Image (spheres, rainbow, N blue to C red):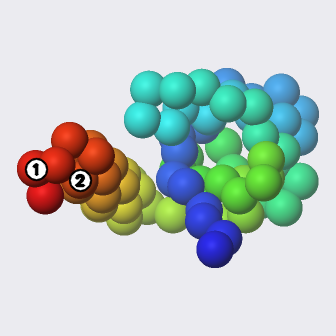
Amino acid sequence: MCLAVPGKIVEVHETMATVDIAGNKRQVSLILTPEAQLGDYVLIHAGFAIQMIDEKEAQETLALFEEWAEKERQLEEGLG
């Protein structure tokens, strides 16, 4: 399964950016999204920002990931 994760660009250095993904910072390449700027949300896959998305879509996706993680925790604890 391939998964792209949304993140917010918090720093830009030429074709690289620091992206905040739910409080975790990662370095990603902007070579596939050269129009991306500070404050934009992007989908990240394999170290590359592959697509720009709006903030609402990013927040909805992150909320779904958190819900998924919570369900996993419950299953591991035998509560699900």
Q: Secondary structure at mark 2?
A: helix
Indicate the position of residue 4 as horizontal and vertical percent values. Answer: 60, 62
Q: Specify the amino acid type for callout 2.
A: Leu
Q: Could you say where residue 41 lies in the image, as x and y percent from the top left?
A: 52, 50
Residue at the (51%, 63%) spot, across then down = 53
Tell me which amino acid carries mark 1: Leu
Quadrant housing the C terminus: bottom left
User: Outermost residue, left direction?
Assistant: 79
Q: Identify whether 35 is placed above or below 37.
A: below
Left or right, 40 with reference to 12: left
Query: How far is disc 1 from disc 2 in space, using C-alphas?
Result: 6 Å
User: In the image, 36: left or right of 32?
Assistant: left
Does the residue at mark 1 contact the one at mark 2 (Cβ under 8 Å)?
yes
Rendering quarter of residue 71: bottom left
Number of the label disc, if any, that sits on residue 14: none
The answer to whether residue 11 is seen in the rendering is yes
The residue tagged 2 is: 75
Quarter holding residue 17 = top right
Q: Is residue 56 visible?
A: no
Q: What secondary structure is marked by label 1?
A: loop
Asked whether, in this view, residue 31 is left or right of residue 41, the answer is right
Side (left or right) of 18 relative to 53: right
- Tell me the residue that label 1 is attached to: 79
Q: Residue at x 28, y 46 (%)?
A: 76
Q: Position of residue 62 (x, y in %)?
A: 36, 52
**Towards the viewer: 71 or 67:** 71
